[in-house]
Structure formats: structure tokens, C-alpha cells
Image (cartoon, rainbow, N blue to C red):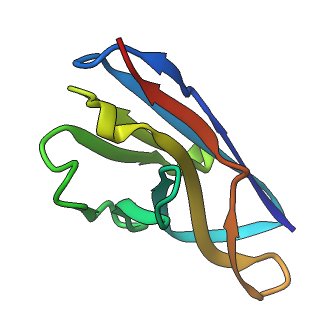
Amino acid sequence: QVQLVESGGGLVQPGGSLRLSCAASGRIFSINAMRWYRQAPGKQRELVATITSSGNTNYADSVKGRFTISRDNAKNTVYLQMNSLKPTDTAVYYCNAAGIDDSSRYYTNWGPGIQVTVAS
């Protein structure tokens, strides 16, 4: 099994910053793409940012220029730096990782999610 755990969420004022982390552990052979999703109350889960194993990134239009995704392959960790936060960024943020485990099986796993609240 591969486990993911998010950290770094909380309450921040509009215009502020937060940095989310997501650490993967367990029976990992490789991690390919790592992604951050979010789900606001009453809305569907949406893809926020993606980073491939080679470092290529992609962002939702709503966060371009404000959020930055990065990863530390040695630590099996992905980060989401969130700047200029808006109340509309309030959501539960989920980490997702896909790859191959040490039994040569494909996996795609989710973290439990972490709350980010942007309010004054």
C-alpha cells in the first residue's frame, strides 16, 4: 500500500499565503504524476495542479500565477505554494499520486484531505 498525508492547511486572511505538503510512503517503486485537487462545499472536486516525474507542471486557470506546485523526489513529497489567496480558494485540498508499487502494480492513491479557509 501507498499512503499519502497532507499538511500545512489552516485559516489565512485574503491576500495571504499557505504552503501545503503531501508526503507519500509505503510500498513505492516509482511515483509518476502528483496532483492537487480541491473540493469546496456543495461543489465537485476539481483539479488544481499537476506535476509530472520530470517536473512539467499544469494549473487550473483559476490559480495560474498564484499557485506553484513542486516536488522533492528524494522525499516522495509534493508541495503547493499558494499566494494571493482568495475566499474562493476555501476548500478541502487533496493530494493524489500515481505510479508503480514494489509489486509492479499500478496505483493511484489519495490523501485524506486538509482544510484551507481564506477569511478575514
Q: Quadrant of the C terminus?
A: top left
In this rendered view, identify the residue nearer to me: 8 or 87: 87
15 to 54, vertically: above or below: above
102 sits to left or right of 107: right
96 to 17, vertically: above or below: below
Q: Quadrant of the N terminus?
A: bottom right
**Residue depicted at x 85% and y 84%:** 103
Q: Position of residue 83 (x, y in %)?
A: 25, 27
Q: Quadrant of residue 51?
A: bottom left
In this rendered view, identify the residue nearer to me: 2 or 10: 10
Q: Position of residue 31 (x, y in %)?
A: 59, 68
In this rendered view, identify the residue nearer to me: 11 or 2: 11
Q: Position of residue 8 (x, y in %)?
A: 56, 26
14 to 34, vertically: above or below: above
Q: Position of residue 64 (x, y in %)?
A: 16, 50
Residue furthest out toward the bottom: 105
92 sits to left or right of 15: right
